């Protein structure tokens, strides 16, 4: 659902309309919104919406089914001297952050604190720092647009629920497709220390539920041990993981150069003297871009069928369920060569990096939009207590985005 809104009668924001003029103040403002994924992000989105509308921009929102979360998309239009065929550049960021529960923070996580040369707070690097820099850039972009000097549109996309499966971005992309908007490029501002990341792995998360048959442990022949059969499947997953690491088509440019399989949780059984009738475990698969989920799903499904047949030969009511819980596509570098050249020129660093973590970048590339990842801060600081971004990283991002804007400007 898309709503273009200019309603001045909205509930009073948590802040007044005197918006920040620099990225540090913007980051401080953004961190103060508790946008942990289990909470609504609407207060932040509506605050940014009002800011954009004060700049004369039209904001489009797409909501989740519960209407308690929203994506934001807006465009600074190209000026009268724009390139004839140009669909613009997207600056993309997610507004949600991970929880702070159980973490030992030395300062309030939702109140930005500067200590030395670092700014601390949940989301400081992942990834409200980039959003702050993008929002600081907007007035300059609007000024260029109004003067006719912006030769390509500049888009801003802010999503919800990236941290729990990249759930918001597909709604933005579906809305853009319906409106006939296909941006030329996208920059996702996840923390990379302002290095250029050109590809990342995909991720798929599976839950396996093994249904056995209970019996007294002195009468094991009368039962079907769910834990035992689950352990056989776990062992097979580990064997596949070893095979993946030995493939000849692995990619040495990735920080982990092969696709990975990893069992993450397992639970089952009620007492030592009872043959367990249920065991569950989860595993994730992080695939190189040229590989698919079928590369591991097909052999695992075959193993599930084999084990199920063995179980049902003893008790027909037993079996194994395999369910997918999460899927985020890999980001490829197949079509981003021109964008890579531009980013290398703007950053002064032509090194291309590939990473194991997943972002919304894969959803953009799957939609035919060449994408790279480049943003302030280090992924090593993300999700931790005392998350921080170095102030110098914010300065570097400000400089990068200004150069990016300059590259979109008509020569005087």
Image: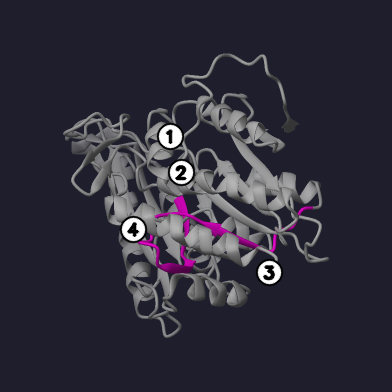
Badge 2 local density, few (<14 within 10 Å), some, or many (20+)? many
Tell me where residue 243 appears, x and y as whole percent.
36, 75
In the drawing, what numbered circle is on residue 262? 4
Closer to the observer: label 1 or label 4?
A: 1
Q: The C terminus lies in which quarter of the figure?
A: bottom right
Q: Are marks 2 and 1 in contact (CB under 8 Å)?
A: yes
Q: Quadrant of residue 215?
A: top left
Closer to the observer: label 1 or label 3?
A: 3
In the image, taking residue 31 as reference, residue 188 lies left or right, namely right
Vertically, is 118 above or below 251? above
Q: Are marks 1 and 4 in contact (CB under 8 Å)?
A: no
Q: Which residue does the numbered mark 2 point to in the structure image?
A: 132
Tell me where residue 345 appears, x and y as whole percent.
50, 76
Vertically, is 355 above or below 146? below
Closer to the observer: label 4 or label 3?
A: 3
Tell me where residue 324 appears, x and y as whole percent.
51, 48
Q: Nearer the viewer, residue 64 or 223?
A: 64
Q: Is residue 293 visible?
A: no
Q: Considering the numbered disc 2 on the image, is that residue within a helix, a strand or a loop?
A: helix
Q: Check the image and name the residue furthest to the front.
A: 412
In the image, taking residue 149 as reference, residue 263 lies left or right, namely left
């Amino acid at each position: 659902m898309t709503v273009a809104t200019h309603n001045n009668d909205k509930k009073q924001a948590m802040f007044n309309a005197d918006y920040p003029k620099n990225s540090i103040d913007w980051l401080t403002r953004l961190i103060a919104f508790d946008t942990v994924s289990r909470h609504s992000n609407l207060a932040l989105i509506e605050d940014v919406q009002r800011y954009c509308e004060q700049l004369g921009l039209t904001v489009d929102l797409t909501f989740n089914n519960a209407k308690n979360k929203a994506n934001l998309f807006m465009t600074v239009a190209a000026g009268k001297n724009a390139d004839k065929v140009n669909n613009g550049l997207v600056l993309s960021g997610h507004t949600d952050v991970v929880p702070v529960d159980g973490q030992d923070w030395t300062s309030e996580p939702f109140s930005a604190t500067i200590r030395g040369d670092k700014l601390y707070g949940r989301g400081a690097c992942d990834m409200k720092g980039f959003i702050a820099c993008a929002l600081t850039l907007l007035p300059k972009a609007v000024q260029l647009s109004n003067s006719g000097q912006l030769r390509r549109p500049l888009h801003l996309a802010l999503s919800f629920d990236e941290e729990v499966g990249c759930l918001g971005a597909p709604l933005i992309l579906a809305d853009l497709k319906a409106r006939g908007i296909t941006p030329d490029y996208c920059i996702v501002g996840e923390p990379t220390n302002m290095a250029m990341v050109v590809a990342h792995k995909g991720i798929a998360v599976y839950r396996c539920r093994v249904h056995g048959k209970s019996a007294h442990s002195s009468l094991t022949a009368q039962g079907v041990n769910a834990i035992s059969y689950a352990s056989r499947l776990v062992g097979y997953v580990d064997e596949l993981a070893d095979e993946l690491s030995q493939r000849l088509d692995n990619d040495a440019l990735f920080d982990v150069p092969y696709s990975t399989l990893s069992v993450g949780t397992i639970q089952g059984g009620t007492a030592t003297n009872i043959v367990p009738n249920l065991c569950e475990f989860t595993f994730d698969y992080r695939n190189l871009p040229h590989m698919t989920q079928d590369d591991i799903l097909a052999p695992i499904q075959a193993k599930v069928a084999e084990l199920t047949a063995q179980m049902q030969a003893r008790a027909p009511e037993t079996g194994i369920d395999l369910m997918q819980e999460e899927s985020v596509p890999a980001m490829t570098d197949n079509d981003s060569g021109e964008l890579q050249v531009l980013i290398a020129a703007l950053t002064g660093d032509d090194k291309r990096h590939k990473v194991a973590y997943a972002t919304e970048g894969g959803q953009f590339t799957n939609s035919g939009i060449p994408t790279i990842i480049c943003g302030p801060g280090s992924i090593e600081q993300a999700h931790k207590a005392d998350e921080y971004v170095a102030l110098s990283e914010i300065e570097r991002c400000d400089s990068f985005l200004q150069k990016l804007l300059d590259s979109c400007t008509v020569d005087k």
